Image (tube, grey):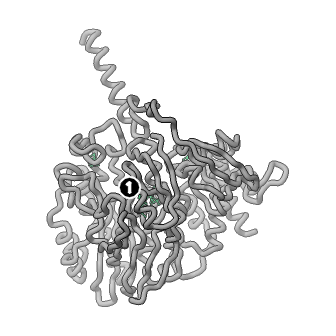
Amino acid sequence: MDDRDLAVSRRGVLAAGAASVAVSQVPLSRAGAADSTAKPAQQAVRLSVNGKAHDLTLDTRTTLLDTLREHLQLTGTKKGCDHGQCGACTVLVNGQRINSCLSLAVMHQGDEVTTVEGLGTPDKLHPMQHAFVEHDAYQCGYCTPGQICSAVAVLDEIRKGVPSHVTSDLTGTMQPTNIEMRERMSGNICRCGAYSNIAEAMAQVAEG
Amino acid sequence: MRSFTYQRAESASQAAAAVAATPGAKFIAGGTNLLDLMKLEIETPTHLVDVQDTGLDRIEDTPEGGLRIGTLVSNTALSADQRVRRDYAVLTRAIQAGASGQLRNKATTGGNLLQRTRCPYFYDPNMPCNKRKPGDGCAAMKGYSRQLGVIGTSESCIATYPGDMAVALRLLDAVVETVKGDGTARSIPIADFHRLWGDHPERETALEPGEMITHVVLPKPLGGKHVYHKVRDRASYAFALVSVAAVIQPDGTGRVAFGGMAPKPWRVEEAEALLPQGASAVVKRAFANAKPRSDNRFKLALAERTLAGILAEARS
Ligand SMILES: Cc1cc2nc3c(=O)[nH]c(=O)nc-3n(C[C@H](O)[C@H](O)[C@H](O)COP(=O)(O)OP(=O)(O)OC[C@H]3O[C@@H](n4cnc5c(N)ncnc54)[C@H](O)[C@@H]3O)c2cc1C
Ligand code: SF4
Ligand code: FES
Ligand code: FES
């Protein structure tokens, strides 16, 4: 094999590698190729975040997640995958947990959004935040804001009788057991594997 | 993501008229599938009509003893409804086996039915895909087909319909109600709602452009034991490799539908008539014309074992 062959095959390897990681990427030829003649559409939206009203004019493409982080500087809510697969962006909208990366800001006209910053503050922690600290329910902390918002909503869903995949008696009352907590939190991935401590923190709050 | 304009419609007929009249327009409900695909520029609508204000968020009793589910009813609300839990448990089970709590809070009944395939090559804009771009070719044919279809596929596409809820709806013989851009309403039996790919994998359902789902109607309850078993690569928050929905009556007769196998929920009425003879007879008949590939042949054995497990559970 001479040098040229090696160069070609190296490029081949790089190209193949790029193709296999490209699953969640826009092709280069199209990235940033916004229509140069038309101005991107903007729209006004009013939303309440952690009890404070905001009037914004946004590119219609702006997700709720980017609105919180880039426009309102509420960087507690994290972006992991941007595709609904990790739960780092979980916030509460009108009391329900959702993935803020898969929702447009303009879809939330008039909605009440609660982020991890709105649940509690460093000197007045929400009981779930307190329990996470007490049980060491994180390592790097990147997934934690999403975990905490999700955990608060999970206990509420159990109280309201929403069943889960592991509920054996669908017509009975829902219980905050360890297996229920684990199943209901499966939309929040933790790269550090703090799962068992998260479930313990939740159990502490559930017991009151 | 490509730029788009956005409006909210106040009624289903207004929404349908707006989408029908605007080239490049699409409905948006929960947004959990559409926005995912828009970020990858697999979907490139130029206008979005948001249907969240159309008031279709209730579950009503029908005079026939069934339920009429508004398209905006979320997956969480539908699965938690007392009537559904009691009389259509297979539907609660199927919904709760899918996605995550966050996604189910946003996912709507109509949007869930219309979720697009999870073929990995469909999701990779650098690979040829007839569904994304008609006539482009199909990267899956020579690729990795472990997740893909074993029956009802075609020369142009071997992808599956990935959802869970629709498998239960097929089992229950639900009916999809719609309104078109010109205001006419129609009902589509769920069996005819999802299409086989044939030469046009880009056409996935019986809906016409601008036709909006308004309701999904469930006939009166079937009784029997309701089961949904989903086999996947992790215990939660993953799409099905194989799923089986069944309603088994005390005399051993019943209904069965399979997910993860085909372009649509797979139910063969002549096959389910063989339920009293056991899982092997049913699966042999239901998948008599299967064309599995070496990567996904295992799905046939898995379907049989999953159904056998269900039958054992129903007898106990
Ligand atoms: C990480 C992840 C994991 C998932 N796992 C699963 C799983 O295990 N099982 C499963 O079944 N699903 C799963 N899903 C898919 C999820 O269930 C769907 O995204 C959801 O149900 C779509 O509903 P939606 O209301 O958000 O639809 P949208 O994204 O709003 O819309 C989807 C499509 O339907 C059209 N549409 C919406 N409403 C109407 C209407 N009324 N009339 C006509 N057209 C309409 C839209 O134009 C769009 O084309 C998963 C999704 C993600 C992101
Ligand atoms: S199987 Fe269908 S969806 Fe997948 S690459 Fe081929 S044409 Fe596209
Ligand atoms: S960033 Fe939203 S789910 Fe990963
Ligand atoms: S604490 Fe590091 S990802 Fe969860």
Q: Position of residue A186 (x, y in %)?
A: 54, 57
Answer with left or right where residue A104 lies relative to residue B70: right
Which quarter of the picture shows residue B89?
A: bottom left
Quadrant of ligand 1: it is: bottom left
**Compared with residue B304, is residue B251 higher up or lower down, i.e. above or below?**
below
Chain letter of disc 1?
B
Location of residue A36 with respect to B114 vertically, above or below: above
Residue at (37% x, 30% y) in the render? A17
Q: Which one is in front, B293 or B217?
A: B217
Q: Is residue B178 above or below residue A54?
A: below
Q: Residues within 10 Å of mark 1 (few under 14, many from 20)?
A: some
| Left or right, A41 with reference to B302 | right
Residue at 66% x, 58% y: name it: A110
Which percent across, then down, holds residue A68?
65, 45
Residue B75 visible? The answer is no
Residue B143 picture location, percent across and down: 25, 42
Image vertical order of residue B210 relative to residue B46, above or below: below
Tell me if I can see residue B89 in this picture. yes
Residue that sits furthest to the left in the current view:
B289
Q: Is residue B116 left or right of residue B199?
A: right
The residue lying at 52 percent from left, 42 percent from top is: A41
Farthest residue toward the right? A123
Residue at label 1? B21
Q: Secondary structure at mark 1?
A: helix
Seen from the viewer's position, the closer of residues B28 and B314 is B28
Front residue (pair B37, B4): B4
Q: Residue at point 37% right, 57% down?
A: B20
What amino acid is found at the position of numbered circle 1 in the picture?
Answer: Ala
* Quadrant in which the C terminus of chain B is drawn: bottom left
